[in-house]
Amino acid sequence: MSVQSAVAETDLVEAPASGASSLRAQGISAWFGAHQVLDQVTLDITAGEVTALIGPSGCGKSTFLRILNRMHELVPGASLAGRVLLDDVDIYQPASRPTDSRRRIGMVFQRPNPFPAMSVYDNVVSGLKLTGRNTRHSRGRADDLVEETLRRAGLWAEVAKRLHVPGGALSGGQQQRLCIARALAVRPTVLLMDEPCSALDPTSTRRIEETIAEIAPDVTIVIVTHNMQQAQRVSQQCAFFLAAEDEPGRIVEHGPTSQLFDAPTDPRTSDYVHGRFG
Amino acid sequence: MTAVVDRPLERTSTESVPLADERAFRAVVRGCAIVTLLLMGLIALFLLLRSWPALHRAGFSFLTEKRWLPDVNHFGVAALLSGTVVIGCIALLVAVPLALGASLFINEYAPRRLRRLLVSMIDLMAAVPSIVYGLWGFFFLQPRMIGLSRWLSAHLGGVLPFLHVHDADTPSSFTSSAFIAGTVVGIVVVPTVTSVMREVFSQAPVAEREAALALGSTKWGMIRTVVIPFGRGGIIGGSMLGLGRALGETIAVYLIISPILDYTTHPLQSGSNTIAAFIASRSTESSSIGLAGLLGAGLVLFLLTLLVNSIAAVIVARSRSGAVTE
């Protein structure tokens, strides 16, 4: 019993920042019912870097992102083909559980979605409770974890004295950083962000971008964004998605962000990053 | 000065003048709404006026007297009220867990086709007349529940005295009890409660569901953290609505209980009574003062269910997500 609780505590807080994972998507196709939205998308995502997915609306970036942590399959009628290797292990192999994949590959959504009635504190530790890790044995350690993750998400200074107000009472930007803290608290090795700033004002956006830069070495980040400047500011790698009319989305070009923006090889990439369409 | 005031007034009024058919339609629906309210008021007024002779004669003791002897001025709803409340509570004990499980299964677990089937089955269940449930309860369920009643009484009767049953050797001590009637009433109200809960659970925000699942939560974990807290108002409100229906349930209770005019203190013991069942059983044989008394009992039931349903409505209306979201 005591051994077990010791293990639980180790599990909870003393696990070292687990380090970033690499993620490789191979031949990903996706459908909603009979409608195909992605065709044979392959992308290597380097560990510890920020990869931006850019492209016009409806080109399948968000679907691609949701395939990377098995959220796509929650949509009724959705299906997919291909493999996603997390540190060389396929998260879609029959033996692997979606809950495990999602725990290791966290997600931040377009609209901030903290649990509104739950306190800021409980929001941060909610992932631990939801994945069956006991927070009761080690209140003090949970406190440390809450402070640490809120600091990493750049929110600690603003909420240190308000940890027990409901998450829904924070401002939009604070809510989004709370969601980042909540995702980081379960110590994912990859963090997916689906247009995390599109519902936020410029100041909040800047704070989130600072947060991304700060956490990037410890956790691989894949971010979908419509904002070209943001892609250039935060990412080292970039992939340009495009869907021709009535066709599923494909990656037109990918590579280092600077190359994609300064010397794109495909004219369509050049047109898009220079704002000539989309 | 007047011109300045007049012009905006004129403009707002011209804007809001609707077309003739629009106006007619609005008048009709408004009329319907008013008639509904008026009917409620008139029913209450009718009950009050017709029961006044009895209420006036019995005074406050109408609520505290358990006997029903109108001719000698000893009559009241106390015994009936106790049975009504006890049977209502037993019905809730049966209906709420069942409805909670059923609504969660239908919303969260059932495949889409099965979900549609189950939803229409629940609606169908709500449409079955309660006399059918009563007959089924009397002939089918009752003989099968005696064993459970006996077990509860034998094993828990020592700790919880109200579960004690006299004459436990004779099976008939366990038949026609508030427990059996309450169970049947519970089944009668399950569809109502399930519908309300299902409706509220289905409104739990997708964003919050996805938040929980993306953290690596199991489905049950997600339901516990998102769906149930969001639907708390619906759980309480739906239960109260079910209680409102259970309090007024007449024919299923009338068929099952053996009527007594005493407090229902031992729900497993044969014999109980409710206001509704009592009115149904006495309405043909009463003297004028007795009839007035029955109408008074009806008024008490009317006010009780009105109160319970109003509280339910307030709770359901207030609970959007159980939280202040910006």
Image (cartoon, coloured by chain):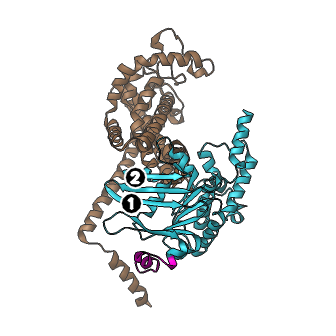
Chain colours: A cyan, B brown
**Earlier residue among tags 2 and 1:** 1
Crowd rating for badge 2 (residues with CA inside 10 Å; few <14, some 14–19, many 20+): some
Question: What number of labels is visible?
Answer: 2
The answer to whether the residues at label 2 and label 1 have Cβ atoms under 8 Å apart is yes
User: Disc 2 marks which amino acid?
Assistant: Leu
Please identify the quarter of the rendering in which residue B248 is found.
top left
Crowd rating for badge 1 (residues with CA inside 10 Å; few <14, some 14–19, many 20+): many
Mark 2 = which residue? A80
CA–CA distance in space, label 2 to label 1: 9 Å
Classify mark 2: helix, strand or loop.
Answer: strand
Mark 1 = which residue? A38
Observer-nearest of A259 and B51:
A259
Q: Is residue B294 above or below residue A122?
A: above
Q: Are marks 2 and 1 on the same chain?
A: yes
The residue segment tinted magenta is: A261-278
Any part of residue A229 in sight:
yes
In the image, residue B238 lies at what x, y percent? 46, 43
Q: Is residue B104 above or below residue A180?
A: above
- Residue B311 is one of the magenta-drawn residues: no
